[in-house]
Image: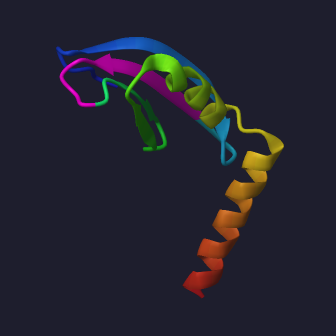
Amino acid sequence: MQLKDTEFRIGTFHGRHDGTPAKVTAVRDDTRPEPYFWLCSCGAGRSFPTEDGVFPSAWRHTHPTRLDRLRQWTTRRLRTGRAR
């Protein structure tokens, strides 16, 4: 991930979700309305107004709990069921 001049990496998380390897990069950018955010190699991302939620959210994205995995599985099943 290439960072802009105003962005500073504050953490990187490696893990898996949806059965594939994932890498989440937590970033701070003071030019944004919500300066803390993370981006995943899967394309997902999330913004925060303070640093408080960045690390737990990024960690959980790359290390989902059993409940998270069940939710992901259910979402995939519902998507494929609607496509038929």
User: Residue 22, position in %: x, y?
Assistant: 57, 34
Taking the spot 73% from the left edge, 60% from the top edge, the residue there is 73
Residue closest to the far bottom: 84
Instruction: Say whether residue 24 is magenta.
Output: yes
Check residue 57 for magenta coloring: no
Question: What secondary structure do most residues of the magenta stretch adopt?
Answer: strand
Q: Position of residue 45 (x, y in %)?
A: 43, 39
Where residue 13 appears, as percent x and y from the top left, is 57, 21
Q: Residue at x 82, y 44 (%)?
A: 66
State which quarter of the image contains the N terminus.
top left
Q: Residue at x 37, y 13 (%)?
A: 9
Split into 4 quadrants, where in the image is the C terminus? bottom right
The answer to whether residue 6 is left or right of residue 77 is: left
In this view, the residue in front, 68 or 19, is 68
Picture quadrant of residue 17: top right
Query: Relative to 15, is 45 above or below?
Result: below
Dividing the picture into quadrants, the one containing residue 83 is bottom right
Nearer-the-camera pick, 37 or 39? 37
Q: Which residue is drawn at 43% across and 44% down?
A: 43
Residue occupying the far right of the picture:
66
Residue 18 drawn above or below residue 81: above
Stretch of the chain drawn in magenta: 22-33
Residue 46 x %, y %? 43, 38
| Res 14 → quadrant | top right
Snapshot colouring = rainbow
* Residue 47 horizontal side relative to residue 80, left or right: left
Indicate whether 75 appears above or below 57. Answer: below
